[in-house]
Amino acid sequence: MGIFITDSTLRDAHQSLIATRMRTRDMLPIAEMLDKVGFFALDVWGGATFDVCLRFLNEDPWMRLRDLREKIRNTRLQMVLRGQNLVGYRHYSDAVVREFIRLAVKNGVDVFSIYDALNDVRNIKLAIEVAKDQGAYVQGVISYTTSPVHTVEKFAEMAKTLESLGCDSICIKDLAGLISPWTSSELVKAIKKRVSIPIALHSHCSSGMAHMSYHAAALAGVDILDTAFSAFGGGTSLPPTEGVVAAFKDTPYDTGLDLDLLYEIGEYFVALSRKYGPLFTTEVIHPSVDVLTHQIPGGMFSNLVNQLREQSILDKLDDVVEEIPRVRADLGYPPLAAPVSQLVVTQAVLNVLSGKRYKRVTEELKNYILGHYGRPPSDVNEEVKKFVVGDKKPIETRPAELIASEWELMRYAGQKLGILHNEEDLVIYALFPQLAVRFLRGEVEEEAMPGVVEAADSSTSTVEPPVELSVDVDGEVFNVKVSPPLGKAVEVEPTKIAKKVSRGAIVSPLRGMVLRIEVEVGDRVKKGGVIVVIEALKMENKVSASHAGVVREIFVREGQRVGAGDILGVVD
Ligand code: MN
């Protein structure tokens, strides 16, 4: 029997190459053709697509799903789900997980590819159960990584557990492209020995091994391979659909897919890749084999470069890249998958920036060490643990046990704000409360991108000079040059931030967004008291008073973007 192909051009490919910026209107014209191919599934939703739709594209992610479903009647639609994190960056309560999955099925998802960044099965068990209850197909995912504590045998044992939980297939998900052909073969064989359900391999071309690994996995008996059309394949993305299909043609592994039809569809994506051309950077087209050491997924690497550039510390890139494996080792070798990847990379940046390791830490790091993300693959370095959380003991329970059901509370709050029109809106609000208010009120504008021009508008264009803006992509805050949309001025948030340094100034250490203001003018604060919480790289960074005193002024408001060195308030 031949190999099945899951095509991920409409999800992972553009997430890996162009920061998830493909628009629904660019997907729909080719959807019916894609439906004719006979793919095992089309991976079209979840991961970063949900967040980016709301944050940058001013698109309703539910609408994207429904529109694709309307045109894709015969092929399974797949989404990637981060277990208890769903499509966000923290754990949500069980009630939110249930509602999200129920509505995802209702709006068109057939296949849930469910992973946990730490491979802690307690974080995905509920999602698997709910998806099965809803009649969906569940792919249980092993987040692949390499480390002194990760072995073929342990991964294979996890596969057995996933099968026992009711998964319909197992996916070896190698998001940074680390798996070698030899290991692919060994791992597929080891899993096959233990389970009877199909096995999928999902790898990226970042290190240059993925094509060979796919071949090796096929010879070892893999059932499904994840690919992307060649115009959006290769580099930090997946192996090319057309090439993989061609490679197995007229062999026992033949996919049975029509190469002429694939070629025709491929032409559409070639044209589309030209449109998005300016977003493809050298780092993602030509990734380095260095990924085997630092393990940062491709899309995230280019964001890191941008972020360091914006903080004017690009010269520290080598230091940060060297620090990442050390932080990862300290934390018990987690796979660098969202949301843990953001946490590790941010800590490496902070360690290099502050000159002393763990002198400054994020709330997320503390929570990680205290077990709120789940059980790390190996023990956290004792010294680091002591330094960061003191004598506090990590929790033993499943992290979501400690989260109160937010669902009805969010419904009440959302109704009070008058932003909810349906249950899907409520999910948006429950997942991304701050972003959702702006999105559901219609205040998010579609982000303009330099050089990416809609064909119909091009005649009237007068190109204005690009403006520097800070944006978030899949958990990364970074700077992009943004050209205004044609004929429209870019709306840059007006800043009330006093730039002049005064005595007692509370200064933002990082570029990011004001998440919470913990004090009011007139409050008395102790030395070290928290003044403001800044969100950068989706991490919470507390900005504290360097001395005791009275809060004289606060210059920022919640939701406002601030730069490194900006003055947030005054305590004297
Ligand atoms: Mn991937």
Image (cartoon, grey):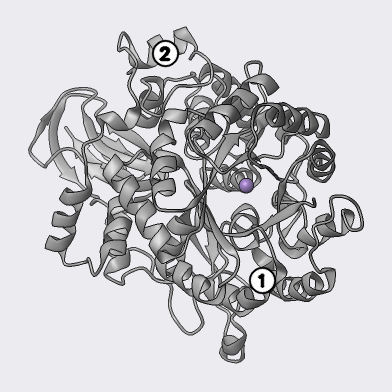
Report whether residue 473 is seen: no
Quadrant for residue 371, please give it: top left
Residue at horizontal 91 percent and vertical 52 percent from the top? 251
Name the residue furthest left. 522
Residue 329 lies, in percent from the top left, at: 58, 18
Report whether residue 358 is seen: yes
Name the residue furthest right. 250
The amino acid at mark 2 is Lys
The amino acid at mark 1 is Leu
Residue at horizontal 78 percent and vertical 57 percent from the top? 240
Quadrant for residue 334, please give it: top right
Q: In the image shown, does 525 or 44 lie closer to the viewer?
A: 44
Marked residue nearer the N-terminal end (1 or 2): 1
77 displayed left or right of 269? left
Quadrant for residue 360, please give it: top left
Instruction: Say whether mark 2 is within 8 Å of ligand 1.
Output: no
Cβ atoms at labels 1 and 2 below 8 Å apart: no
Residue 313 lies, in percent from the top left, at: 57, 38
Vertical placement of 249 versus 462: above or below? above
Name the residue furthest bottom. 459
Position of the C terminus, as image quadrant, is top left
Q: Which numbered disc covers residue 34?
A: 1
Q: In this figure, which residue is indicated by the disc labeled 2?
A: 385
Residue 53 lies, in percent from the top left, at: 45, 63
Residue at horizontal 32 percent and vertical 12 percent from the top? 393
